Amino acid sequence: MDGRFSRRWLIKGGLVVAASPLLAPTASAAPVLPWPAANDIVARTKRPVFPDRTFSVLDFGAKGDGKTDNSAAIKKTIETANARGGGHVVVPKGTFVTGAVYLKSNVDLHLDAGAVLKFGSDASKFPNVLTRYEGIECVNRSPMIYAYKESDIAVTGRGTLDAADTASWNKGKDREYLESLVAKGVPPEKRIVPGSGHAMRSTFVEPYACDTVLIQGVTLKNPVFWQLHPTLCRNVTIDGVRTDASTAHSNTDACDPESCDHVVIVNSHLGAHDDNIALKAGRDADGRRVGVPCRNIVVANCVMDGNWGAITCGSEQTGGISDVYAYKLTVTGETKYALYVKSNTLRGGFTENVNLDRVSGTFARSFAYVLPDYNGQTGAYVPRFGPFTISDSASTKCGQAAFDVRGLPNSHVRGLRVSDCRFDGVASTENTLDHVDDLRFVNTTINGKPV
């Protein structure tokens, strides 16, 4: 067994959840996704398989009393598991205060039901690491869980990751400072944020340049910034995860794969005080320097509970986004858009071949919003959009028009195809469709009237 999904892993009405969080899902005879290419992505996305060995953090001195600093004990447990060829590092029921957790190859960090990793208020416990802040590489304080150039890693179980106490130090959004360093030609390893007099937040869970990553079953609470941020990774699976929709902090996207290849996100309740899923690929000059796209993405059988886009592409799309498939998404609350695509001529890049099927819910603004002049920024890099396909989808509310899709005079949207859809509760029946080629509405109604 090599850890890949079976092509018949899907079951009727959704995707099967693994019977045990320590094992890959078993095959089942079932219908597949409506796109052959999406099924191929699922089949090719590898999942880690771990040796049948367990290492309890208690055996290395950890105490789940809600006050002991367990940073060293958890670190030693993970390092020992890695040195012995890998296995499951088990956090039992209890509240374990810790600093940053660094995952190593062939290690599954498994949180039993009732286990809480409570990330602490001591900034010194979060050492400097290479990261990306809003699409720009820099050195910043570590995310709560981090890995760099590791392979076959996981965070699994029914426990909770709690970042509430990090709010005391995890502050700031001075991206302009980083942009000034990029303009001066300062390399990423010298763009050091702590001690610079500037501050930028660290993300919650961030595997960076890793291969074969699984995040399964856990709950994330009290985020300060983006919650799940796999960056420059391959073979990423997010399964049965619950993220926080709290309004305590803004800009807490649920899941932001950035410059990743082969990502499968399933069976999850993605709460956010911003985008539910935001696909990214670097920003402006630094994004062009790295030049790695985000591609081969499947999202299925998820509840979307954020207040911006269910599926957002950009605005950090400089390296490009392509081959995105979203199936059976239930959108709740006051989410503004099912599909939100944004760039400008400073950012450039592309968002191509995005497909939505069986996406439904209430939308505070529009079902689809595509704009090429985000934030009014301009430059010499013309973005490319499309084609987009939307099928078998519905709304019970759109606070504005169902579609606001715009290309540029010199860069048209290269296809918008909408079929077998019903959009009800639409405030304005006047769609905005500017500079859109290959525009097709088939068997689709708005407020009961055919388009």
Image (tube, helix red, strand yellow):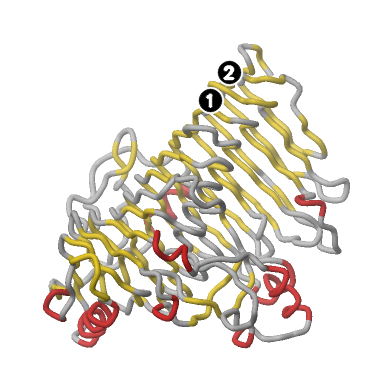
Q: Position of residue 81 (x, y in %)?
A: 21, 81
Q: Position of residue 222 (x, y in %)?
A: 41, 54
Residue at figure coordinates x 32%, y 79% from the top left: 104
Looking at the rendered structure, the kind of residue marked 1 is Ala
Whether residues under marks 1 and 2 lie with C-beta atoms below 8 angstroms apart, the answer is yes
Quadrant for the C terminus in the image: top right
Q: Is residue 261 left or right of residue 365?
A: left
Most distant residue in the right direction: 409
Q: Position of residue 211 (x, y in %)?
A: 41, 72
Give the mark, 1 or 2, whose residue is nearer the N terminus.
1
Q: How busy is the neighbourhood of tag 1: few (under 14 within 10 Å), some, or many (20 plus)?
A: many
Quadrant for the N terminus in the image: bottom left
Residue at figure coordinates x 27%, y 44% from the top left: 16
Looking at the rendered structure, the kind of residue marked 2 is Asp
Q: Nearer the viewer, residue 67 or 71?
A: 67
SS category of the residue bearing label 2: loop
Residue at figure coordinates x 78%, y 83% from the top left: 184
Q: Quadrant of residue 291?
A: bottom right
Q: Nearer the viewer, residue 88 or 260?
A: 88
Residue under circle 2? 424
State how many labels appear: 2
Q: How busy is the neighbourhood of tag 2: few (under 14 within 10 Å), some, or many (20 plus)?
A: some
Q: Nearer the viewer, residue 396 or 160?
A: 160
Residue under circle 1? 394
Residues at marks 1 and 2, CA–CA distance in whole angstroms: 7 Å
Q: Nearer the viewer, residue 246 or 450?
A: 246
